[in-house]
Image (tube, rainbow, N blue to C red):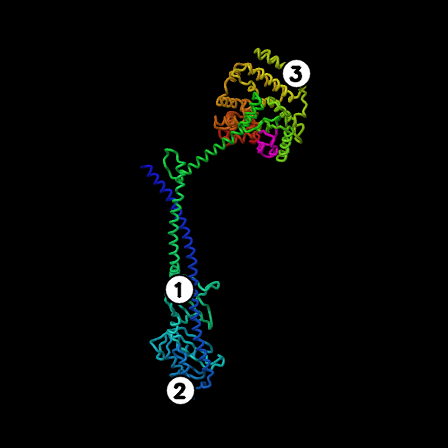
Amino acid sequence: MRNVGAGKKRKLSIFMRYALSYMLVVLVLLSAVVAYLYRITERQVRDNLVSAQINRLTRIAIQQEGYISAMLNTAEEIGLNPHIEPFRYDEEPWKAYDLQLQLVPYTSTNPFCDQVYLHFSGDDRMYSSASSMTVDLFAELMRYERTDPEELKALIQGTGRLTVLPAQRVVSNLVDGSEPRMVTFVLPLGAHPGTSKGTMLFLLKESTYQSMFADAIDGEINTYIFSGEEVLSATEDLEISPAQARETPENGARYRVFQENGRSYLAVSLGRRSWDLSYAAVLRMEDVNSAVHGSLRGTLAVFLILAGVGLLLAFWMARRHAKPIRDISDLLAEDGAERRDELQQISTGIRQLTRRNSELISRLDSALPMQRHDFVFRFMKGRFRSREEAVAAAKAVGLEIDREYYAVILCGVPENWDWPLELNCPPFDRFREVTGTGVELVALKGILYLVFSDRPEQLPELAEAARRAGNEESGGCATAISALHRDFSEAPSAYLEAATAYDDRFIRGGEAVLSYDSISSNVAGILPRAQKITHAISQALAMGSREQLDSRISELLQFLKNSSMSPFAFRMIYNDVIDTLTRSQAAALSSGRDAREFYDIFSLSSCQSIDDLDELLRRLCDSLLTDAARESADAPADPEDEMDQVVRYMEEHFSDPEISMAAIAESFGISTTRLSLSFKEKTGMTPLEYLTQLRAQRARELLVGTDLTIREISVQVGYYDSGSFIRRFKQVTGETPLQYRRSQSPAPAPANGTEAPEEEK
């Protein structure tokens, strides 16, 4: 029951994770679409409202301009009417009655005007269709809210252009209603203001304008008609300053948004038109937003339906995708392990698989080069008893060496140069009929290629291709090749031939491949006598006589010195001697171990003098002669004991500047790759790191306990160059030698009172 519940919990966990993710995606997409539509709808609704207000203001402007045109036409017709001529009342009073009758038609045809008055220039009376009175009396009877009687009289008697008095309250018995608000127009009488006969005064009730402002639009809107800077008439549902509505929008826009009293408003302007009149309307932004929301309701309903469909789809996709996740999690889960979150389980499983795969690939990649490396060194040392054994060992590492000819090629390459070891990449990929591989020789700073082919001419061609490629990359690549061989047992000789030719690079240069065939060694005439002495040495070994053994070796040494041979030829003679001895003494070894394992061909190639060769031969004979050597040959070497010996060897010889990985490996008869891997597995650091630690520790003791200079200490701990010593010391301790000495104790003052620079010390 617990496992079932845990399984349901896992299913719910992964399902809800997917479901919530998909739902979030759906909601984000819908939110983005709704936000976009809101912006679009807001702009469209605002533009529609602005267009509606512009149309409305245009209608008001046209109607207002129609009223003004009608009044101007009336003034012009009266001025041109031949029956209406200016007169003075005090001279011709009877004409006042006729004038009143003449004004009746003009008053009745202007229904938008409440009152029409006429005044002749040079007269002091005002006439209408119903009465006449003096200008003074008229000014006294018409009590304007913001215009005093004198100003009104001045307008009546001296106006030569259209003048408008904005809407204001008028108290008069001449006007119907109780203190109505009136708009007053004062116009010249006649077609041309310069020839005006007088003045006409038109009174319009503000209710006329209110009827113009009325429309079917719901909501509170302020509508304004401006005459210059003053409000001619307005409907004010909103408490705002008319100056805000009068302000012109920037950049030629038709509207603008402004803030007043903490609220936002939308002002729509028509701009100035005829007679310096302008028109504006103001709406609240709340009304605009309400219109936007109203327009979005239908769209939001559609999107709610789509959101429901999207959520259902999200649940369906979550169920569909959760199942394979659970299946993979169950596959990766370890038996008996606690159930965890599926994604965490998969992540952990993938990391484990990736790590295992990387380890496997690393092992495979590193195993084959190491195996080929060991095969080449075993082959060169002549460790295979038969051709068939060598061919089988080569097949195990992916090499087909059952060819008629083989040779050894040595290529000198610069440090840190990524030169290929295999023949399946440039510059060797065109030699498809040649098989072989290469190994790095640290001591020679070069690469050894062991190559096999049924066509003998291809092996020198391959050496030439290597030389040319090296010259193109580095500007100098000495390349040497041994003579061509068929017998696999001649492999040590083949290596010595290539090494001999390679050593000749200092004389012959690297303009061509250095071939052993071109070197004269005069070995043939001396070899028979050397073989006789070798036979005597073998007899001494068989008898176990150290005295006779020393005597015969000294005889061989003296004979070779008297033969005037080069050290390279001595190597060939010694190789033949040592090969004969190891073969002849093989039966004397216990456990059937090959005597060749006491002898390393690479150690022989590093000998630079006859004395070095003599020492090598004596060590070999001593190893063959003593019981300790035969006991060590009976049992395979223990890698751990062998690394202990390497550690002791490094502790005893760390001050030797010539010590190196290659030298250590050759001393113990192992490859540098095996030495590096086994040593690091044993000690946790590489041989070079351990050597640096030993030298740094000894340097600390000398820095604190002696007055030796930095240069003298660097020589004592195994460095030729004090600069290399300083860099290595600082790498280990974090301080330069001089800084370390000063931190431990005060430095002694030099005799002359000055201290030498650190690099000189």
- Disc with the residue nearer the chain's start (1 vs 3): 1
Q: Is residue 329 above or below residue 443?
A: below
Percent coordinates x, y for residue 255 in the rendering: 44, 64
Q: Which corner quadrant of the image does residue 413 belong to?
A: top right
Q: Which residues are magenta?
A: 409-437
State the image quarter where residue 93 is shown.
bottom left
The reply to whether the magenta stretch includes residue 330 is no
Q: Quadrant of the C terminus?
A: top right
**Amino acid on which the number 2 mark rests in the picture:** Tyr
The crowd level at tag 2 (other Cα within 10 Å; few <14, some 14-19, many 20+) is some
Q: Give the main secondary structure, helix, strand or loop, of the magenta stretch.
A: loop
Q: Secondary structure at mark 3?
A: helix
Q: Nearer the viewer, mark 2 or mark 3?
A: 3
In primary-sequence order, the first of circles 2 and 1 is 2
Residue 417 lies in the magenta stretch = yes
Q: Which mark is residue 528?
A: 3
Q: Are marks 1 and 3 in contact (CB under 8 Å)?
A: no
Mark 1: amino acid: Leu
Q: Is residue 450 visible?
A: yes
Disc number at residue 283? 1
- The residue indicated by pointer 2 is 97
